[in-house]
Amino acid sequence: MIHLPFSKLSNVGTTIFSQMTQLANENEAINLSQGFPDFMPDSELLDLVNQFIQKGYNQYAPMGGMIGLKEEIARKIEKSHQTNYHPDSEITITAGGTQAIFTTIATFVKKDDEVIIFEPAYDCYEPTVELFGGIVKRFEMKAPDYEIDWNEVKNLVSEKTKMIILNNPNNPSGKILKENDIQELIKIVKDTPILILSDEVYENIVFDGKEHLSICKYPELKERSLLIASFGKLFHVTGWKIGYCAAPKALTDEFRKIHQFNVFSVNTPIQMALAEYMKNDEHYLGLNQFFQEKRDFLRQGLAQTSFELLNCEGTYFQALKYNKILDKNDFDFATELTINHKVASVPFSSFYKNRLNENVIRLCFAKKQETLERAIENLAKL
């Protein structure tokens, strides 16, 4: 057997999402761990995909994406955030949000560049930065409120800071950025060359009438930002792996230099179907209410249990604090919950480099009503 001289990511193993899903399958548990819906997407969208396949749209799309889809994205952004991106030169269709994140980091981060992230953090940020020789600087947001101390963030900034990665709304905490957060960020990056990677894949899942403050709404930030979004979250099709990156032309030009050698282009009939489907704004404008009803149902069902329900302002994840139930670290608690009580979750410590344990787990409520009912029934027995 060949001896591998080194591993570029020697400390990286299988993701916690795969681990918990496997554990759920092995124990026939209700899987509220991995963030995917267990219900079908709109049949109209499925029919459109089939129509474009039958019409012969089965070969390579242009590297940057089908122009019709990019025009619909530009229209959506203008309507939602009152700002413009040129569809052809400033929007790139990607193979999901994660590929867009990977390509952004690959494009701009080089050896010894520093990148600031906010934990709890989606698990692809740090290893991708390290893969390209960057150094991760972390700010830990903590339970129960996951607030950001911007003075501490400012202390993380140095002459080597290349990028700040935001995730708004935040997975897993459900926290959204407020106006004060944005204004503090503007102060920090002013008169610097710092870039911003803004992961906004849950932008259309914000609750209680609150507003999603996209990075592109602020000219001082838009000019230095790459905005990442996902159709998987928007239309309940996570397995299609299709998203986009919107950025000023100069940043997009550099992004596409890497994108063309990464995936080159993305699924053609699905792009065509999405372009047609997005012409009806109602297909996504009701998403907030759709998921708020699921969030409220889950919260009401768990209100009388010993779990402490943390605030959920966005995403389709609910954080639960369980310290009144069992004195175990969150990984052990999540494992026991899956095996003995047949509900799979994700321990929050997996979203922190130092495995910060605050006795918090994450549940996904992008599920059928009957799935949530069964999960609530099981959890209420604790």
Image: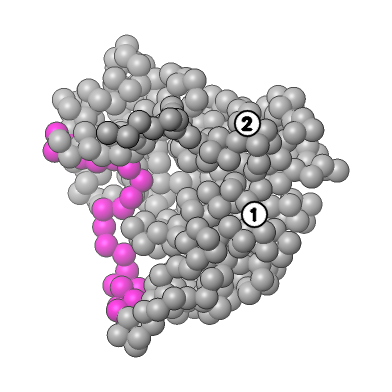
Q: Secondary structure at mark 1?
A: strand
Q: Amino acid at mark 2?
A: Ile
Q: Position of residue 80 (x, y in %)?
A: 61, 64
Q: Looking at the rendering, which quadrant does residue 33 occupy?
A: top left
* Residue beneath the point at 59% across and 46% down: 105
Closest to the observer, 294 or 366 = 366
Q: Looking at the rendering, which quadrant does residue 297 occupy?
A: top left
Q: Is residue 48 at least partly visible in the picture?
A: no
Q: Is residue 120 left or right of residue 47?
A: right
The relative height of residue 262 versus residue 324 in the rendered view (above or below) is: below
Q: Secondary structure at mark 2?
A: strand
- Disc assigned to residue 62: none
Q: CA distance from mark 2 to mark 1?
A: 20 Å
Q: Which residue is mark 2?
A: 135
Q: Is residue 306 left or right of residue 370?
A: right
* Residue beneath the point at 32% across and 69% down: 42
Q: Amino acid at mark 1?
A: Leu
Closest to the observer, 342 or 371 = 342
- Magenta highlight range: 27-51
Closest to the observer, 196 or 283 = 196
Q: Is residue 96 left or right of residue 29?
A: right
The relative height of residue 40 versus residue 319 in the rendered view (above or below) is: below
Q: Which residue is mark 1?
A: 226
Q: Is residue 71 at least partly visible in the picture?
A: yes
Q: Can you name the residue that lies furthest to the bottom here?
A: 55
Placement of the N terminus among the 4 image quadrants? top left
* Residue beneath the point at 53% across and 54% down: 100
